Amino acid sequence: MDIINDMLIMIKNGSRAGHESVVFPYSKLKHAIALCLEREGYVGAVSKKVKKNVPSIEVGLLYNGEKPRVSEVKRLSKPSRRVYQSVKDMRPTRQGTGTIVYSTPKGIMTDKQARKEHVGGEALFSIW
């Protein structure tokens, strides 16, 4: 099972259904990805909740009027096929309107941050 893909699909489907927030099981990686998406303005407030000793992450969803902020998500690196990119190979996605999220030695960051820090890594997914 791919926990990152499950999280992304929950965010996309929750946005399309018009929900205010979505909740999914906690992991450090998913929390770091959610915080990165919050910094970029794709999702609202991210908080860690504990209910009956089971941690979870609650993510608020954002909308542009009636339209969801997250319209599509594409998983790039999968458990069956990992995709790594160096700084030289990083290109803007969707003519600069989308964002690619990378797992780098300096943590989870977007393509713009990775180019600024001059670090490459695993291309997790693209979002727009």
Image: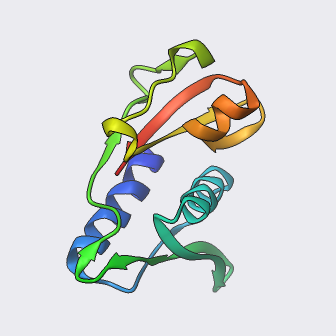
Number of numbered discs: 0
Horizontal and vertical percent for residue 58?
54, 77
Q: Nearer the viewer, residue 67 or 51?
A: 67
Q: Nearer the viewer, residue 41 or 52?
A: 41
Name which residue lies at 68% across and 54% down. Answer: 28
Query: Outermost residue toward the front?
Result: 95
Name which residue lies at 64% across and 22% down. Answer: 120
Quadrant including the N terminus: top left
Horizontal and vertical percent for residue 3?
46, 49
Q: Nearer the viewer, residue 42 or 55?
A: 42
Residue 1 visible in image: no
State whether residue 127 is above or below residue 60. Answer: above
State whether residue 22 is above or below residue 81. Answer: below
Q: Which quadrant of the structure image shows residue 96?
A: top left
Residue 19 visible in image: yes
State whether residue 63 is above or below residue 101. Answer: below
- Colouring chosen for the image of the structure: rainbow
Name which residue lies at 64% across and 86% down. Answer: 52
Horizontal and vertical percent for residue 75?
36, 38
Q: Nearer the viewer, residue 53 or 103?
A: 103
Q: Which quadrant of the structure image shows residue 7?
A: bottom left
Horizontal and vertical percent for residue 66?
22, 82
